[in-house]
């Protein structure tokens, strides 16, 4: 079995450490989203995780978005 190195551990760590705190992200397509929590996983052979936002728990008035971590160009927090 071939071991695939996940290249996004630091990104997942950031989201986990900020669980429940708004984190703003800019994606390669120019979309900016607010993330309060994530559900993530890797498909077989993937180096980058797929992320679904704001579903566990559901956040009132927050969008639910789906993307891969390699689509992120910038992670912002309200402290910046």
Image: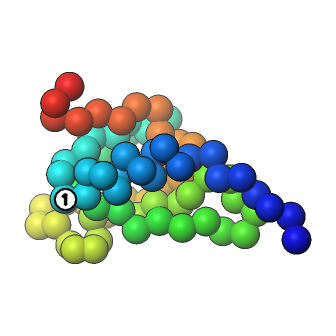
**Residue lying farthest right?**
1
The colour style of the image is rainbow
Report the residue at 54% width, 67% height from top: 41
Q: Is residue 29 visible?
A: no
Image coords of residue 14 (percent x, y):
37, 46
Q: Up-down: is 50 above or below 76?
A: below
Q: For the C terminus, which image quadrant? A: top left
Residue 71 placement (x, y as % from top left): 53, 42
17 vs 33, nearest the viewer: 17
Query: Residue beneath label 1, please?
Result: 20
Mark 1: which secondary structure? loop
The relative height of residue 9 versus residue 43 in the rendered view (above or below) is above
Q: Residue at x 34, y 40 (%)?
A: 25
User: Is 48 left or right of 44, judged from the image as shown?
Assistant: left
Q: Percent x, y for residue 65?
A: 37, 59
* Residue under the point 23% across and 36% down: 77
Q: Is residue 48 visible?
A: yes
7 left or right, relative to 78: right
| Label 1: few (<14), some (14–19) or many (≥20) C-alpha neighbours in 10 Å | some
- Up/down of 63 relative to 74, above or below: below
Q: How many marks?
A: 1
Q: Residue 38 appears in which quarter of the rendering?
A: bottom left
Identity of the residue furthest to the left in this view: 60
| Residue name at image x 45 percent, y 52 percent | 12
Would you place residue 30 above or below residue 46 in this image? Answer: above
Q: Is residue 38 left or right of residue 67?
A: left
> Is 48 in front, or is 61?
48
């Amino acid at each position: 079995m071939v071991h695939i190195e996940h290249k996004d551990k630091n990104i997942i760590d950031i989201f986990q450490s900020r669980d429940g705190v708004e984190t703003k992200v800019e994606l390669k397509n120019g979309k900016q989203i607010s993330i309060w929590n994530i559900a993530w996983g890797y498909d077989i052979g993937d180096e980058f995780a797929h992320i679904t936002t704001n579903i566990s728990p559901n956040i009132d008035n927050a969008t639910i978005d789906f993307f891969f971590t390699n689509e992120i160009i910038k992670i912002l927090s309200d402290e910046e």
